Image (spheres, coloured by chain):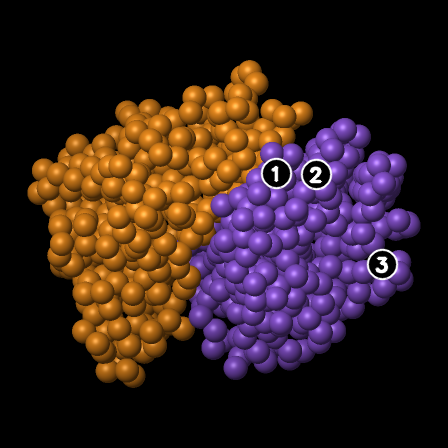
Chain colours: A orange, B purple
Amino acid sequence: MKLSDLHTPCLVLDQLKLKHNIDVMNARIQAHGVMFRPHVKTAKCLEIARLVSAGNTGPITVSTLREAEYFFAGGFEDILYAVSIVPARLRRVQALMDRGCDLKLILDNIDVARRLAAAGMEMQMTFKTLIEVDCDGHRAGLAPNDPAVVELAKILNDLSGVEFLGFMTHAGESYTCSSIGELKRHAVQEAKAIIDCTQAVGKAGLSARIRSVGSTPTATFVDDLSGISEVRAGVYVFQDLFQVGLGVCGLQDIAMAVLTTVVSHKQSQNRLIVDAGGLALSKDHSTATQKMDCRYGLVCHAESGELIDGLYVEAANQEHGMITAVAGQIDYSLFPIGTQLRILPNHACMTAAAHDKYHVLDVDANVCATWSRCNGW
Amino acid sequence: MKLSDLHTPCLVLDQLKLKHNIDVMNARIQAHGVMFRPHVKTAKCLEIARLVSAGNTGPITVSTLREAEYFFAGGFEDILYAVSIVPARLRRVQALMDRGCDLKLILDNIDVARRLAAAGMEMQMTFKTLIEVDCDGHRAGLAPNDPAVVELAKILNDLSGVEFLGFMTHAGESYTCSSIGELKRHAVQEAKAIIDCTQAVGKAGLSARIRSVGSTPTATFVDDLSGISEVRAGVYVFQDLFQVGLGVCGLQDIAMAVLTTVVSHKQSQNRLIVDAGGLALSKDHSTATQKMDCRYGLVCHAESGELIDGLYVEAANQEHGMITAVAGQIDYSLFPIGTQLRILPNHACMTAAAHDKYHVLDVDANVCATWSRCNGW
């Protein structure tokens, strides 16, 4: 199948770049001598998770129970569900554990720990738990120096129905960095948060077997992972314009794009209108805070995947994307109506979520496979 | 089924408000004595389209061929596909027409018209076409005074393989208005664009049978539809915070919300963290340009649907929404972890697209039905 056989808008995935991104990160984590627990929330795709674990079904991180169910059905057993657990979800957790899934939960609250323990007792199960630690004020989790860290660990250790495995944190604020030096400081801070908690519970006689850190930027630039048992990262498989802006990768590393078709010439506004709008691209505009604001995406030739200098997606309605030029007039003779283009995404996780599959491209830009995604909750 | 039985995040739909919004718009259009061709791109749902056409399967507008296929399979035959047609899509158009679908296409380009005619001749079909007119510089379409309007109409009228039906326009720039007076001026401008084109082709001896205008704001406030044959509107079925900001409706009219669960208390940041993040809410932040910036949504009690004054979704990561207070400290005792909340969306079309179904709520907030959506392309 060729690109021209595809119904646009749709996702295309450069197999070579995908494999390159995977190889680079795998080598990096391996060099640190720690375990890699890739976050599959970006790709949500069995084939890609298998590529990451070199054909195996290694440990993974998920962001939804739907993902946990999908990847467990695909053979992945060691799964960290990295969003704070709430008691209402325990039936689905139980169903997975009953079938043999080694599902690990996270929490940051003493009341939840007690409710989990009570539910575990009632269900005659033991829920495996990690405490979420907040290393940078980005999301959920306890501050590393919060006395509740030790209190919570003790409760999880002492009560029946729950088990204390360790700590996890995510350096989400690394996304605000503007230099490699800053990213490295975030990586240090991320690891330190986990080490501090491990030492604190150590003094109370508890052992944190899992000491988990991760984000694509910190996993890329971290120098020292002493004391850390595993690293998580997700978006690196595709990379995106935001990661380019951070300095994590180059434009040539972005593996995923939205294939689109020129549907109208709006010469009076110096615009090409394409059929990838806000739904196909997402309304994520995260590069707005970076040096290079890419609006809703940069534009590439469909076949070669090469960047077309100076074009970008200026605006996005539901099904219309408006491409314009940074400077000068668009040469419309180069882009007849019907021309296919690729749009590089600001934020691959958000863009991919609008689609239910990837069309995988070989080196000749032929479609060599179609891989499904597991969307929803 | 009760709200507490639902897996969050998910969409909930207040049946009473939905019906109210539908009734109000139906009465408004009926009073103008013109045909209503609702845009089903917001709800993408058969049951809702049937409610709009009072149990029938009346004329509709779609934004994707996937919608055309889905609604035609559900009994809707008169379908306007309101995104510029490109020749690569004609096989799917043909498949629909062959099965009896009265599918109408739009275009704004003479080269496309000739290619459509050639394809029609080759396929032994006649593609029904409307010319897209640009009334406000918002999207695609020819300017009403562009000589290409008459030239294109003549080509569509004269060539075999294509048929000229009339004109359509969409007052998308009405979304930038800040007063009812301005909205009314946009409604006048929208209708005038179509009337001007109709008169121009009339002088050339051509008749524009379909003269189609529409957007929720202009359909709400238009005073005079003389010369117009049909009106389109879509988001009014749900309404949203952006429409509230425009003055199109009140907060109490918003029929659709994202049901979510409190998963973490972040007292140090005065935040409640919920399980509806950027994926479940969308990253649309369109109210940023309005007087009342609602960030990623306003917060309501789950059962009553009543607004909780002063709370809003400040930030949204992939699976985490951060709720904070406009002023003062959140009283965490009111929102234990596990509490369900509803989030009102900025832009219902974008938010709904992240989900595959609606849970319909009766007056007691019980789930009385589950309706599917037709996502993708």
Point out the frontmost of discs 1 and 3: 1
Identify which residue is drawn at 34% across, 44% down: A2
Instruction: Check disc 1: other Cα within 10 Å, few if <14, some if 14-19, many if 20+.
Output: some
Amino acid type for the residue under numbered disc 1:
Arg
Residue B92 seen in render: yes
Instruction: Kindly identify the residue that appears in the image at 83 percent across and 46 percent down.
Output: B207
Q: Which type of secondary structure does the marked residue at label 1 adopt?
A: helix
Q: Position of residue B284 (x, y in %)?
A: 56, 46
Q: CA distance from mark 1 to mark 2?
A: 8 Å
For image coordinates 57% across by 78% down, the residue present is B369
The chain holding disc 2 is: B
The reply to whether callout 1 and callout 2 are in contact (CB within 8 Å) is: yes
**Residue highlighted by disc 1:** B114
Residue indicated by mark 3: B34
Residue B189 lies left or right of residue A137; in this view the side is right
The answer to which of marks 1 and 2 sits earlier in the sequence is 1
Residue where numbered disc 2 is placed: B155
Establish if B52 lies above or below A98: above
- Residue A150 sits in which quadrant? bottom left
For mark 3, name the chain. B
The answer to whether residue B284 shows anywhere in this view is: no
